[in-house]
Amino acid sequence: MSVIILLRHAHSAANDSGLLTGQLPGISLSKKGFAQANQLVERIGKGHIDRLHISPIERCQLTIDPWLRSKYSSTLESFRVDDSLTEIDFGDWSGRKLSSLRREKMWSFVQNRPSQVTFPNGESFRAAQRRAFEGVERIANARGSKVNLVLSHSDTIKLIVSKYLGMKLDSFQQLQINPASFTILNVTKGGTSLITINNMGALKDLL
């Protein structure tokens, strides 16, 4: 059995400004996000995770930095940056205002028929789900895998969870994953169970 704790990065500056940033570099956390990152020191705590896997996007590193600098990280067995956990490549939509994107004809497909969407000069939802799910499967099936903290992004986490739960891709937008929230899966050879989703509590109360 492997426990997968999916953590969305803390509130970002792009969340404040209503931008769809995707894989664009240089996007920091907001004031609220830095506060959430500091709160995660106690929410993650000590001795609850064995391995840490994070998206290469800067806002994920900024989210976990306070915990890594704390005394609680001393029991961590390994830390890995994993490209499979990155945000969706939104292509030409990256860096645009969500208020503008909502007027695009493709917006309704993004929300209601994501299985049919490939972003212009970017990634499809199907491809993003495949690489993220395969990445988490490698983590879950790794030798000696125990409790893994997987730090990623809202859509990426929703795609992972929907795949494990057997949901249709066109339904994944029904899930909600807020900044700095925990979603926990128990992954076994016999199947996967959802322990909690979009939870703002502390791991000591959830595991």
Image (cartoon, rainbow, N blue to C red):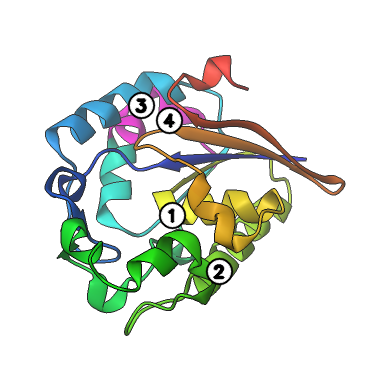
First in sequence, mark 1 or 3: give its number: 3
Relative placement, left or right, of 95 versus 169 is: left
Position of the C terminus by quadrant:
top right
Identify the residue position indicated by label 4 in the image: 73
| Percent of width and height locating residue 90 | 32, 71
At a point 32% along the width and 48% down the height, the residue shown is: 60
Relative placement, left or right, of 102 versus 173 is: left
**Tag in front: 3 or 4:** 3
Q: Which residues are magenta?
A: 66-77
Q: Residues within 10 Å of mark 4 (few under 14, many from 20)?
A: some
The amino acid marked with disc number 4 is Ser
First in sequence, mark 3 or 4: give its number: 3
Identify the residue position indicated by label 1 in the image: 155
Task: Determine the CA span between mark 1 and mark 3.
Answer: 21 Å
Q: Give the secondary structure at mark 4.
A: helix
Q: Give the secondary structure at mark 2.
A: helix
First in sequence, mark 4 or 1: give its number: 4
The amino acid marked with disc number 1 is Asp
- The answer to whether residue 182 is above or below residue 200 is below
Identify the residue position indicated by label 3 in the image: 40
